[in-house]
Amino acid sequence: MRAWKITEAGSVDVLTLDENMPKPPMKPTDILVKNKAIGSNPVDYKVKSDGGFVQPSEEAPVVLGWDAAGVVEEVGSDVVGFSAGDEVFYAGDLGRQFGSYAEYTPVDYRLVGKKPKTLSWAEAATIPLVAITAWETIKEDMNVEEGSSILIVNGAGGLGSFAIQLAKQLGLTVIATASRPDTIDWCKNLGADHVINHRESLAPQLEGLGYPKGVRYVFHCFEVGLELGEFMKNVVGPCGKLALIQYAKEGAYGTIDGTDCWSHRKTLIHSFMFARSLHNVGVEKQGQLLNAVSEMIDAGKIKHTLSKTLRFEEAKELMLLQESGKSIGKLAMTVEE
């Protein structure tokens, strides 16, 4: 099979197309998916840069990528609910050697959902990782209350774009952040009630919208540095929750005012959708979640946010575009026969 692999961490130049990689081995709980399209996420270039949980080598190269949509080719002996020929989508497992930047990928069937019937392969491939992250954070970890307000930082990104739509479906008032005319319009078209500028102080802008004490829920869909303390104190309101999609930069946690968090009952959440598969905790919930999202999409309640599609052979260009931080929505590449 063809697969994009790395044998060491580094720049985009370490990404190499192997035209004759053997099909990867399967576990009893795996299905082997013939990928039709592959979604791109920031985790792709971050693992490329630092090696991730599975360190690559010449003897054991790592295939990058996690999001994909395709057709079930084979099923393991312990697989339930899937058969060859099923159309599926999945976000995979960060702890495995073989990811989705390939013609075939083995995936634990419990992490897989049935592909939305109304989406193309490329559109479907952009959904799983952001859908799982947004759902687990907003519905499960935050356990949001209908009628409350949520601030979504980086609303025009892939995750923010899905989070805006999910939050609206859950009955929340959505405040998104964006800084360019095109990204502001993007957030509004997805349903954001208000859009404020993340390149300016957020607390005064929230006060101008009628939130002088901050908002109940904050979903920070970008990297966080030393501004973490300011977020907790002035952006998160009383009894509020702040969710981060990755651990904050060095020194950031020391900026948090513990007394303020205690006296205002504020909660800091770390959102990491790969935790279930890495630690084997409620793995089946992600497949169930994807099936629920698939139904919402087919019912017209959630729409895809694919903004650009490239070919499988253009994986390096895709990664550079993702790494630039200037893309809107989601990116994907299609796999030709």
Image (tube, grey):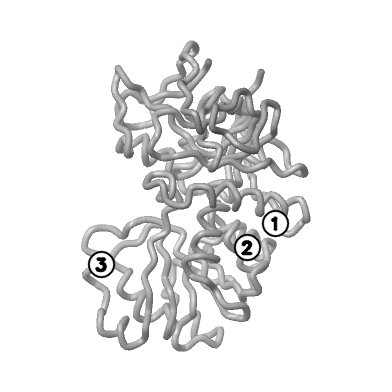
Count how many numbered circles sit on residues in the image: 3
> Which quarter of the picture shows residue 226?
bottom left
Q: Is residue 334 left or right of residue 268?
A: right
**Residue 42: x percent and y percent?**
45, 45
- Name the residue type under label 1: Ile
Q: Which residue is drawn at 61% across and 47% down?
A: 127
Instruction: Pinpoint residue 140: horizontal percent, then vertical percent.
Output: 51, 65
Identified by mark 3, the residue type is Tyr
Nearest the eye: 313 or 58: 58
The Cα–Cα distance between marks 2 and 1, rounded to whole angstroms, is 7 Å
- Name the residue beneath numbered marker 2: 166
Q: Residue 253 carries which label?
A: 3
Instruction: Report if the CB atoms under discs 1 and 3 are less than 8 Å apart.
Output: no
As measured in the structure, the alpha-carbon distance from the residue carrying label 1 to the one carrying label 3 is 35 Å
Which of the marked residues, 1 or 3, is nearer the chain's N terminus? 3
In this view, 142 is above or below 43? below
- Relative placement, left or right, of 74 versus 12 is right
Q: Position of residue 310 (x, y in %)?
A: 60, 31
Residues packed near mark 1 inside 10 Å, few (<14), some (14 to 19) or many (20 plus):
some
The residue that appears at 60% across and 72% down in the rendered structure is 174
Q: What element carries label 2?
A: helix
The residue that label 1 is drawn on is 302
Question: Is mark 2 in CB contact (under 8 Å) with mark 1?
Answer: yes
Q: How far apart are marks 3 and 2 (CA)?
A: 29 Å
Instruction: Depth check: give the residue in front, 278 or 185.
Output: 278
Which residue is nearer to you in this view: 286 or 170? Answer: 286
